[in-house]
Structures are given as C-alpha cells and as structure tokens.
Amino acid sequence: MTRATLNAISPFFIVSDLPRALAFYCEWLGFDIAHASPDPHPFFAIVQRDEVQIFLKAINVTVAPLPNSQRHPWARWDAFLYAPEPDALAAEFIARGVSPSTALADTNDGLRGFEITDPDGYVLFFGRPRQTEAQPFL
C-alpha cells in the first residue's frame, strides 16, 4: 500500500477581534492574508508566511479565547513554527518593533528559539532543534 504524504499542519485560533488579529500577524509578523471570509462582516481568515499558515476565526461568544498558557502555564505553546534561522527571525521581528515574550535562547528541551504572544494570548514558539554532533540541522 502506498503511503499518502502530509505537507503541513495549521493551528486554528479562536480570536476575539479578527481585524486586530490580522493587523498583528500581517503588520508585525510579516504574514499575508491568504483567504478571508467576505465582507461586510469577516469572521474567518487564513494568514500565511512562506509555508506557514494560521487559521483565525472570530466567534460571537462572551467567553474569551483560552490559549494553552491560561490552562497549563508549564505547557504554554499554542504553536511551534519551525524557523531554520531563529536568530535572524528574532532580529527581523525586533526591527519591526515586536518584543518577543521570551528572549532568543537555547531551551532545556533541546531547541533554539523564542516566543511571541499574540493579542489573544496565543503563544507561538519560533525555532528549531539545536544542532548537535548526533543531529545536524533539519
């Protein structure tokens, strides 16, 4: 039997304000809008940068989004975004005026990267596994 290929996975974030979320991802992080529900009341969009996509959906509820960090502070990442050059990406974001939630560093679990928290509290880790002699860069 032939094994089918998977190419990507996209996190799906419930947001409280779609225009605010789009502004953050596009203006601050350099994403483009790949798709948006039609006006006059857009409620769904897909933002994309290179091969990374994030789905954003505003729903009409009184309960705020619940990112992982609010449920489990020790497991706070809502998305891991593979960045082969996290140092260069961190420098780009800082030049855009974005303050990382955590500084660029080598983590205890063998990664190198940094965190950014979006306006709804979702924590995105931008990074890659650290290079070791046993494991070269991916």
Image: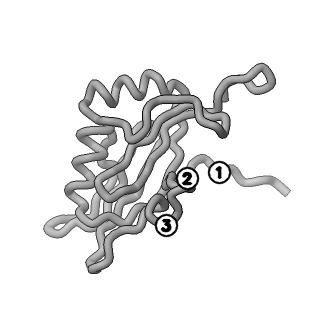
Query: What mark, if any, has residue 63 been given in the picture?
Result: none
Location of the N terminus (image quadrant):
bottom right
Left or right, 92 with reference to 4: left
> Seen from this angle, which residue lies furthest left?
40
The residue pinned by badge 2 equals 9
The residue type indicated by label 3 comes to Arg
Give the quadrant of residue 109.
Answer: top right
Badge 3 vs badge 1, beta-carbon distance below 8 Å: no
Q: Position of residue 24 (x, y in %)?
A: 26, 46
In the image, farthest residue toward the right = 1
Q: Secondary structure at mark 1?
A: loop
- Mark drawn on residue 6: 1
* Residue type, mark 2 in image: Ile
Picture coordinates of residue 43, whole percent (x, y): 26, 67
| Mark 3 Cα-neighbour bin, 10 Å: few <14, some 14–19, many ≥20 | few
Count the marks: 3
Q: Residues within 10 Å of mark 1 (few under 14, many from 20)?
A: few
Nearer-N-terminus badge (3/1)? 1
Nearer to us: label 3 or label 1? 3
Residue positioned 80% across, 24% down in the render: 134
Quarter of the image with the C terminus in it: top right
- As measured in the structure, the alpha-carbon distance from the residue carrying label 2 to the one carrying label 1 is 8 Å
Q: Are marks 2 and 1 in contact (CB under 8 Å)?
A: yes
Of the image marks 2 and 3, the number of the one nearer the N terminus: 2
Mark pair 3, 1: CA separation: 29 Å
For the point 26% across and 51% down, the residue is 22
Q: CA distance from mark 2 to mark 3?
A: 22 Å
- Left or right: 122 in relation to 81: left
The residue that mark 3 highlights is 71
Q: Secondary structure at mark 3?
A: helix
